[in-house]
Amino acid sequence: MRGAIAQKLVRMVRLNRTRIDFLQEFHKMIDEYNSGASNIEIWFAKLTAFAQRLSDEEKRGIAEQLTEEELTIFDLLTKPEIKLTQAEEHSGTMQ
């Protein structure tokens, strides 16, 4: 399950960098598990809830009737704390 979520996250972030907070949250969950800070039942429940949030995020564009590119622009306008790389600013695309 962890591997599938990691692959999904990488793909989602490549399409829309404003989703980077999901990736950071996932890494934090993995670090907590690896350090033994959380027991397996609690961690699995968190991981399952996280996977559901990812699925909801993936469907958000459809619900808003936006293409992935339009959703990315919408997110950039509503989440201004996201920083683009210099190459992204010049090319007008997010990697």
Image (spheres, rainbow, N blue to C red):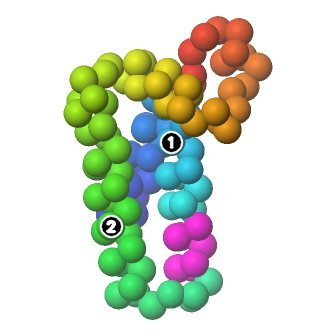
| Sequence-first tag of 1 and 2 | 1
Give the residue at x 60% y 73%. Answer: 31
Q: Is residue 82 magenta?
A: no
Q: Is residue 4 above or below residue 78?
A: below
Q: Which mark is residue 49?
A: 2
Give the residue at x 40% y 18%. Answer: 70
**Quarter the N terminus occupies:** bottom left
Q: Is residue 25 above or below residue 21?
A: below
Q: Nearer the viewer, residue 53 or 9?
A: 53
Give neighbour class at mark 2: few <14, some 14-19, many 20+ (Cα, 10 Å). few
Quickly name the residue at label 1. 19
Q: Nearer the viewer, residue 8 or 93?
A: 93
Give the residue at x 45% y 90%. Answer: 39
Give the residue at x 31% y 68%. Answer: 48
- Image coords of residue 74 (percent x, y): 46, 25
Q: CA distance from mark 1 to mark 2?
A: 17 Å
Stretch in magenta: 28-34
Q: Is residue 32 magenta?
A: yes
Horizontal placement of 74 versus 51: left or right?
right
- Image coords of residue 27 (percent x, y): 57, 62
Helix, strand or loop for disc 2: helix
- Image coords of residue 9 (percent x, y): 44, 47
Give neighbour class at mark 1: few <14, some 14-19, many 20+ (Cα, 10 Å). some
**Identity of the amino acid at label 2?**
Ala
| Residue 45 placement: quadrant | bottom left
